[in-house]
Image (cartoon, grey):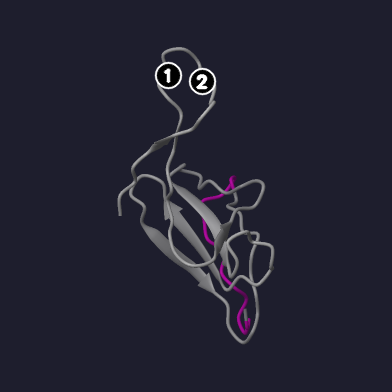
Amino acid sequence: MSLEPQPIPGAQLPPGSGPAVETQLTRGQGGRVLANTGVWSPDSRWIVYDVRSDPAGDAFDGSRIEMVNVETGEVKVLYESSRGAHCGVVTFRSFSGRRIPRPTGSTA
Protein backbone atom coordinates (compact mmCIF):
# COMPACT_ATOMS: atom_id res chain seq x y z
CA MET A 1 0.00 0.00 0.00
CA SER A 2 1.41 3.34 -1.00
CA LEU A 3 0.97 6.26 1.36
CA GLU A 4 1.66 9.00 -1.20
CA PRO A 5 0.89 12.43 0.27
CA GLN A 6 -1.31 14.80 -1.71
CA PRO A 7 -1.21 18.62 -1.35
CA ILE A 8 -4.19 20.19 0.41
CA PRO A 9 -5.34 23.19 -1.65
CA GLY A 10 -5.51 26.43 0.32
CA ALA A 11 -4.00 24.99 3.52
CA GLN A 12 -2.37 27.63 5.74
CA LEU A 13 0.77 26.58 7.66
CA PRO A 14 3.47 28.54 9.48
CA PRO A 15 6.34 29.76 7.22
CA GLY A 16 9.05 27.14 6.73
CA SER A 17 6.90 24.18 7.78
CA GLY A 18 6.48 22.83 4.25
CA PRO A 19 3.30 22.13 2.31
CA ALA A 20 0.24 20.63 4.00
CA VAL A 21 -0.47 17.15 2.70
CA GLU A 22 -3.41 14.75 2.85
CA THR A 23 -2.81 10.99 2.75
CA GLN A 24 -5.46 8.33 2.21
CA LEU A 25 -4.82 5.62 4.79
CA THR A 26 -7.59 3.10 4.11
CA ARG A 27 -9.33 1.66 1.09
CA GLY A 28 -12.24 -0.65 0.45
CA GLN A 29 -16.00 -0.74 0.29
CA GLY A 30 -18.12 1.34 2.62
CA GLY A 31 -17.13 4.24 4.81
CA ARG A 32 -14.77 4.72 7.70
CA VAL A 33 -16.33 6.92 10.36
CA LEU A 34 -14.32 8.73 13.03
CA ALA A 35 -15.78 9.98 16.29
CA ASN A 36 -15.42 13.71 16.90
CA THR A 37 -12.77 13.18 19.60
CA GLY A 38 -10.38 10.53 20.94
CA VAL A 39 -9.53 8.87 17.62
CA TRP A 40 -5.72 9.04 18.05
CA SER A 41 -3.97 6.33 20.07
CA PRO A 42 -1.98 7.49 23.11
CA ASP A 43 1.26 6.98 21.13
CA SER A 44 -0.14 8.97 18.14
CA ARG A 45 0.55 6.09 15.71
CA TRP A 46 -2.99 4.78 15.19
CA ILE A 47 -6.40 6.18 14.30
CA VAL A 48 -9.47 4.19 15.37
CA TYR A 49 -12.78 4.17 13.44
CA ASP A 50 -15.86 2.11 12.66
CA VAL A 51 -16.68 0.67 9.22
CA ARG A 52 -20.19 1.25 7.82
CA SER A 53 -21.94 0.15 4.64
CA ASP A 54 -22.18 3.53 2.93
CA PRO A 55 -19.19 5.79 2.19
CA ALA A 56 -20.82 8.83 3.83
CA GLY A 57 -21.45 6.91 7.07
CA ASP A 58 -25.09 8.03 7.24
CA ALA A 59 -26.39 4.57 8.19
CA PHE A 60 -25.50 3.36 11.68
CA ASP A 61 -24.87 -0.22 10.57
CA GLY A 62 -21.20 -0.74 11.39
CA SER A 63 -20.03 -4.29 11.88
CA ARG A 64 -16.33 -3.68 12.58
CA ILE A 65 -14.07 -1.50 14.67
CA GLU A 66 -10.63 -1.05 13.09
CA MET A 67 -7.52 1.01 13.56
CA VAL A 68 -4.95 2.10 10.99
CA ASN A 69 -1.29 2.84 11.58
CA VAL A 70 -0.64 6.33 10.19
CA GLU A 71 3.02 5.54 9.43
CA THR A 72 2.70 2.15 7.71
CA GLY A 73 -0.96 1.86 6.63
CA GLU A 74 -1.36 -1.41 8.57
CA VAL A 75 -5.01 -2.04 9.46
CA LYS A 76 -6.06 -4.10 12.49
CA VAL A 77 -9.60 -5.32 13.14
CA LEU A 78 -10.27 -4.73 16.84
CA TYR A 79 -13.85 -5.94 17.03
CA GLU A 80 -16.42 -7.54 14.74
CA SER A 81 -20.08 -7.68 15.74
CA SER A 82 -22.31 -10.70 15.20
CA ARG A 83 -25.96 -11.77 15.31
CA GLY A 84 -27.18 -8.61 13.58
CA ALA A 85 -25.65 -6.24 16.15
CA HIS A 86 -23.98 -3.00 15.07
CA CYS A 87 -21.09 -1.07 16.56
CA GLY A 88 -19.57 2.35 16.18
CA VAL A 89 -18.43 5.68 17.59
CA VAL A 90 -15.21 4.22 18.97
CA THR A 91 -12.56 6.21 20.87
CA PHE A 92 -9.29 5.59 22.67
CA ARG A 93 -9.03 6.24 26.38
CA SER A 94 -6.30 8.86 26.55
CA PHE A 95 -5.55 8.40 30.22
CA SER A 96 -4.88 4.64 30.15
CA GLY A 97 -2.96 2.31 27.88
CA ARG A 98 -4.57 -0.84 29.25
CA ARG A 99 -7.32 -2.87 27.65
CA ILE A 100 -10.54 -3.42 29.53
CA PRO A 101 -11.73 -7.05 29.43
CA ARG A 102 -15.33 -7.87 28.63
CA PRO A 103 -17.36 -9.20 31.55
CA THR A 104 -17.64 -12.98 31.74
CA GLY A 105 -20.69 -14.21 29.86
CA SER A 106 -20.87 -11.11 27.65
CA THR A 107 -22.47 -11.64 24.25
CA ALA A 108 -20.95 -8.50 22.76
The disc labelled 1 sits on which kind of residue?
A: Ser
Q: In this picture, which residue range is highlighted in magenta?
A: 94-107
* Residue nearer the viewer, 94 or 29: 29
Specify the farthest residue to the top.
15
Q: Main secondary structure of the magenta part?
A: loop
Residue 83: within the magenta?
A: no
Q: Position of residue 94 (x, y in %)?
A: 58, 46
State the image coordinates of residue 92 (x, y, percent, origin top left). Answer: 58, 52
Judge whether residue 26 can be spotted in this image: yes
Q: Find the residue positioned furthest to the front.
A: 9
Q: Are marks 1 and 2 in contact (CB under 8 Å)?
A: yes
Instruction: Give the labeled residue for mark 2.
Output: 13
- The alpha-carbon separation of the residues under discs 1 and 2 comes to 7 Å
**Residue 56 quadrant:** bottom right
Give the image quarter of residue 77: bottom left
Q: Which residue in the protein does label 1 denote?
A: 17
- Along the viewing direction, whichever of 102 and 36 lies nearer the viewer: 36
Instruction: Please tell me the numbered disc located at residue 33.
Output: none
The amino acid type, in three-letter code, at marker 2 is Leu
Residue sitting at 61 percent across and 54 percent down? 91
Asked whether 105 falls inside the magenta stretch, the response is yes
Q: Quadrant of the C terminus?
A: bottom right
The secondary structure type at the circle numbered 2 is loop
**Vertical placement of residue 25 versus 84, above or below:** above
Residue 100 visible in rendering:
no
